[in-house]
Image (cartoon, grey):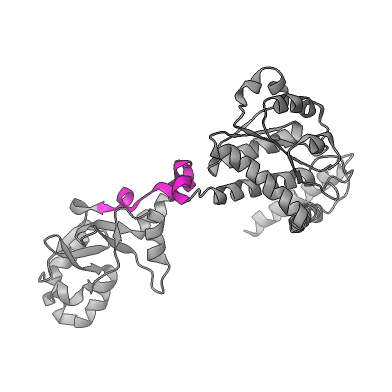
Amino acid sequence: MPLVNDLWHKQSMETQKTTKAKPGRKKLDLAAEVARVLELEGRAILECAKRIEKLDIARDVSHAIEILASALDQGGKIVVTGVGKSGKVGQKIASTLCSTGSLAVFLHPSDGMHGDLGLVTAKDAVLALSYSGNTEELVQLLPSLKKLGVPVVGLGGKADSKLAQSCDSWMDGSVAQEACPHNLAPTTSTTLALALGDALSIALMQMRGFDAGSFAKNHPGGTLGRKLNLRVSDVMLRARQIAKVSESTLMEVVVVALTEKRQGAVLVVKGEKLLGIITDGDLKRALKFREKFFSTRASEVMTKKPITCTEEMMAHEALKLMEDRPNQISVLPVVDSRGSWKGLVRLHDLIGSF
């Protein structure tokens, strides 16, 4: 290990020398620079939040959301548009709107001027992004939108701009300065625009009652999709996979059944009725009977009236039921609405599903 550490140290020192020797590089505290940018952009978001607390700006924001919501209520959509970095932010906002239940599309202003304006209908509303508010391609599109009778919500940094003066509602996304040391590259302003887009999306989501069930329909894949859509029935062990005994079964038989199935538990049943459960932990505690252990009955060892779940329960809810307690549960009996046993779900299987 000392030899490996010495070799690593030597390579690290050589790398540092090489880095310092490269021409044109400015000596900089990199961590401090990252922290400066994050602090600056975070402050811009907080300052915007403070501005919205003012009555006149609060009215503007509410008006903008009402315009967007009205379009959705009458079967229309939100058309997001912007150029350059604003366009990239607009694409993300359109995606967030869709995933939170507000139908949205992105339209590049140049495409709109050359045929794609056909996707905009009178039922729609437009969310136009431009920090300067004077972006040529965007400004040229505005008269055509007016002719269609489509309301426009503008989001930018200049209240005296052409966009601000032409739109039906204006959202103030101004920032004191960009994170770029030359105050040129869109950085702080695009971060704020993105945050405002998130805020609009969530406000519309809440306003229109888009619940977790609706959210799940829009997210069928990935970890999030599994969390929202996976039910206990998708991961549970069924009758043929689990060990079952009666309440009069001797413990020597229970041990054999538990060992054969290797599922961490045995259900104690009477026909379709669940009487209790015997887990590995119950077996260990039952060893207090010592030499009488193997002649002990299942009814004397089992946990009566165990915590259960249903097949219809969301898998993440069952996982929470098992974990959020003083003593974690590793298995849950699965029952139906009448209390009849249906199977078993294991903590291991639930965790592995997400």
Magenta stretch secondary structure, dominant: helix
In the image, 169: left or right of 326?
right
Q: Which portion, as a residue range, is magenta?
A: 212-237
Q: Nearer the viewer, residue 191 or 66?
A: 66
Q: Nearer the viewer, residue 352 or 196?
A: 196
Is 265 magenta? The answer is no
Relative vertical location of residue 282 with respect to residue 237 in this rendering, above or below: below
Is 227 magenta? The answer is yes
Q: Is residue 35 visible?
A: no
In the image, 73: left or right of 308?
right
Total count of labels: 0
Q: Quadrant of residue 284?
A: bottom left
Please give the name of the residue rendered at 79% of the width and 34% of the height, measured from the top-left corner.
166
Q: Is residue 16 visible?
A: yes
Residue 137, x across and y down, in percent: 78, 26
Residue 282, x across and y down, in percent: 26, 73
Please give the name of the residue rendered at 31% of the width and 63% of the height, measured from the top-left corner.
331
